[in-house]
């Protein structure tokens, strides 16, 4: 019973921490939106994904002046772009695997009634960051697996299985089964 109580306390504490973190992230995202432009103004700019070595850098620039509004190398954990991008946000990450420069123009309209759009943008930005981080972790894991497979195959050189034991269908192992079909 004591162990169950401890587990319950740990879970409640973890839930409190996650809730506080969520509100902190939402506050930072809101601040980031409302600082660059005032209400009822339109901000036109570009949203870029730039490959630099193994790191993916996200930059948001103003269209007219080219002024940098946000860069993911600024020390923030999340990049804080919150905008209505007419459903084109996914195109920003289309060429990440090829490591090419990708740029998407956007238009952000802020007014007094745009709070629901802002919260939707918060969720889009947070999920995009998550998918980017997962992509980077997956990429590093895949490279580790590939290097292990390469070294494993080099050690097994000369121990190849004879081809005559296999047929064109991978689920049938010997010619005996092939003849029965």
Image: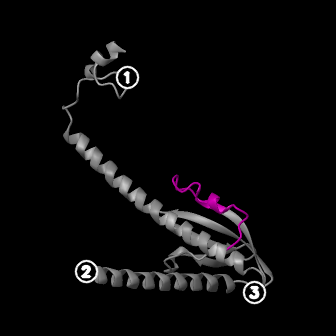
Disc 2 versus disc 3: nearer the observer: 2
Residue at 59 percent across and 77 percent down: it is 80
N-terminal of the pair, mark 2 or mark 1, is: 2
Find out whether the residues at labels 2 and 3 contact each other: C-beta distance under 8 Å: no
Secondary structure beneath label 2 = helix
* Residue at the disc numbered 2: 3
Residues in magenta, as a range: 83-103
N-terminal of the pair, mark 1 or mark 3, is: 3
N-terminal of the pair, mark 2 or mark 3, is: 2
Q: Residues within 10 Å of mark 1 (few under 14, many from 20)?
A: few
From the viewer's side, name the closer residue of 66 and 2: 2
* Residue at the disc numbered 3: 38
From the image, give the main secondary structure of the stretch colored magenta.
loop
In the figure, residue 172 lies in which quadrant? top left
- In-image side of 126 versus 112 (left or right): left
Q: Residue furthest front?
A: 1
Find out whether the residues at labels 1 and 3 contact each other: C-beta distance under 8 Å: no
């Amino acid at each position: 019973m004591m162990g169950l109580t401890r587990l319950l306390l740990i879970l409640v504490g973890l839930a409190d921490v996650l809730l506080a973190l969520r509100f902190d992230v939402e506050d930072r995202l809101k601040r980031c939106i409302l600082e660059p432009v005032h209400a009822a103004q339109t901000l036109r700019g570009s949203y870029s994904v730039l490959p630099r070595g193994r790191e993916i850098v996200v930059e948001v620039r103003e269209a007219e002046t080219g002024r940098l509004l946000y860069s993911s190398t600024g020390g923030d954990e999340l990049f804080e772009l919150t905008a209505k991008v007419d459903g084109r946000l996914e195109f920003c990450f289309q060429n990440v695997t090829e490591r090419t420069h990708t740029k998407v123009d956007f238009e952000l309209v802020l007014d007094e009634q745009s709070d629901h759009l802002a919260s939707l943008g918060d969720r889009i930005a947070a999920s995009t960051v998550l998918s980017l981080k997962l992509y980077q972790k997956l990429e590093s894991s895949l490279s580790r697996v590939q290097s292990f497979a390469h070294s494993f195959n080099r050690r097994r050189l000369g121990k190849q299985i004879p081809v005559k034991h296999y047929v064109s269908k991978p689920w049938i192992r010997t010619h005996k089964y092939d003849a029965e079909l």
